[in-house]
Image (spheres, rainbow, N blue to C red):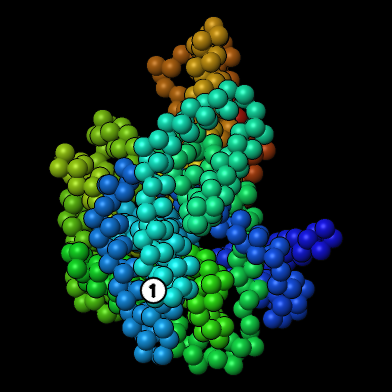
Amino acid sequence: MDSALTLVLILLASAVSVVVAFRALNLPPVLGYLLVGAVIGPQALNWVPESEAARHLAEFGVVFLMFTIGLEFSLPRLFAMKRIVFGLGAVQVVATLVIAMVMATGFGLPWGTGFALGGALSMSSTAVLSRLLADRQELDARHGQEVMGVLLFQDIAVVPLLILVPALSQSAGELMGTLVLAMVKAAVALVVVVFLGQRLMRGWFFVVARGKSAELFILNVLLITLGLAWLTEQAGLSLALGAFLAGMLISETEYRYEVEEDIKPFRDVLLGLFFVTIGMFLDVRLVVAELPWVALVLTLLLTSKLGVAWGASRLFGSSQGTALRTGLWLCAGGEFGFVLLAQIRQEQLAQPQVLQVVLAALVLSLLLAPLIVQASDRIVLRFVASEWLMRSMQLTQIAARSMGTEKHAILCGYGRTGQHLARFLEQEGISCMALDLDPDRVREAAVAGESVTFGDCARKETLVAAGIARANVLVITFSDRHAAQRVLHHARELRPDIPIVVRALEDSDVEKFAAAGATEVVPEALESSVMLATHALALLGVPMSRVIRRLRELREQHYVLLRGFFHGASDVDHGDEADQPRLHAITLTSGSYALGRAVAELELDSLGCSVSAVRRRGARGSNETPLVAGDVIVLLGIPSALASGEKRLLQGK
């Protein structure tokens, strides 16, 4: 008991410290886990000797990983992407396996070893690449769809590989019979799951959910996951296959998302410990001694997978630029490669030196994956001449659409928010230019006559082509904070004076966007709560005039541009509205006191009013620069404070 507790404590303490550092450096946590294992394992400090307890922890990590893959398994999604998944994905995996077998034979290794290692090397990192695609807003791009399709096939391919790899350790005479028997068992299990299991699972989860107990629900998930894993192991198959089938069963029920959230802590912790145990059998001294071989395997891995993915993408009709991007994204290794390497080691299908070299190459490739993705655009533009032409044509199309417009609005993103905003602007007679990266959405909207075109608004040249120099406002309608910050950076470089309105998913993003140059930030959480409160107060019988006043006061507290209003002759003051803050515009003439002074020097706050805006020749001015004749100062305050502020600006009193 003491040794098991000591093992867990050492693993947890080491993992926490290293993963914190890796997240701060924006590196994949997988690398941190592997590094922890390499340092504390039997090949280095020997804090954690190789033991049965460590192997059991690793097995549970794989079980919950495969359960999660099963949860994400969707037959409708597979059908929608069948050409990419079962076409491009199958070609990539099979071709990589064949190349690995040929190379292994050339180096004097058995074909079975080449097949097993090829399966491990054919995998790419779903966790790393899917996050990078989302961060770069490239999920809807052609290469993004291809990458996700191949990753999906790789996730599926792990299941038969987990069945095939153990069988390869048997003699040639027994191999075929074992494989046929394993495939029959797997097919029977799959048929039972698809045709019988879903109905039973939905009914059982309904019974459990009626108990309204979170503890019972989680216990039930653990029971089903580990129970099916145990059953498949008793049938001579792997634990991971049973966990995958359990995930498939639950994925088609309405309880999928609740299960996914409940199981995530178990999966992440155990999977992290699995990668620690993988790192434990990495012998750093042997890797250093075999460094030329590690470099050779790493080079062969990156170039071979790049070539295979590029060729497969071209085979399925992609352009050279898209094919090269797909290859660059998929050329590195992935976490399932470590799962298969652990099984290869357990079955003793490869010599320890060979495993060490392959493991080191996989670790290095995973470390290089984000860097390769970062440089992918530059590499494509450097080696694919047609990419320059396509980029130029895209920018030309954007420029052609925006050429006849001026004083227009540029909408970054044309999802539901962008489309609603475009309709509001159209009703007011304001022209707009929308940019979006979803080709299907752009195509349908353009056919319908909408002013939208395909383009990445996070690129400086795209904003130039969209006419940012002539635009009156830029609106960022999507909620991706990283992409929004890139747009803000480029927009402020190109047009420091253009008003920019940004949509924020969280209140915590408001200050970040404001510091990056946003004129106004609209947090979704605030707006939804404001509207909920408005409807609730109205339904509770609060007079509508009071509801509107509360709504206006709340928004004025958060939005600078909505504070106050310009009072006109037709406006009638009612009761407590007579002393509400209002706006007043004052034009500085040649004899005004404020000329040559910055706004801060005038100390208008002491009079009870503030400067809402400074306009110079129709553009928004700065509060820091000295005022000149013709500047328009917009003051915010109650009527008496506005009168005092006007005297200060014009007469200095």
Spot occupied by residue 65 in the image (x, y as percentages of width and height): 53, 54
Q: Is residue 596 visible?
A: no
Query: Residue furthest toward the top?
Result: 541
In depth, the one of 30 and 289 nearer the eye is 289
Q: In the image, 460: left or right of 234?
A: left
* Quadrant in the rendering for residue 88: bottom left
Query: Residue furthest toward the right?
Result: 2
In depth, the one of 57 and 176 nearer the eye is 176
Spot occupied by residue 502 in the image (x, y as percentages of width and height): 45, 45
Q: Secondary structure at mark 1?
A: helix
Please name the residue shown 41% across and 18% down the image. Answer: 569
Q: Is residue 53 visible?
A: yes
Q: In the image, 392: left or right of 419?
A: left
Question: How crowded is the residue under tag 1: few (<14 C-alpha within 10 Å), some, or many (20+)?
Answer: few
Amino acid on which the number 1 mark rests in the picture: Gly
412 w.r.t. 5: above or below: above
Spot occupied by residue 250 in the image (x, y as percentages of width and height): 47, 39
Q: Which residue corresponds to mark 1?
A: 173
Spot occupied by residue 379 in the image (x, y as percentages of width and height): 33, 77
Please name the residue shown 64% across and 55% down the image. Answer: 269
Q: In the image, 455: left or right of 203?
A: left
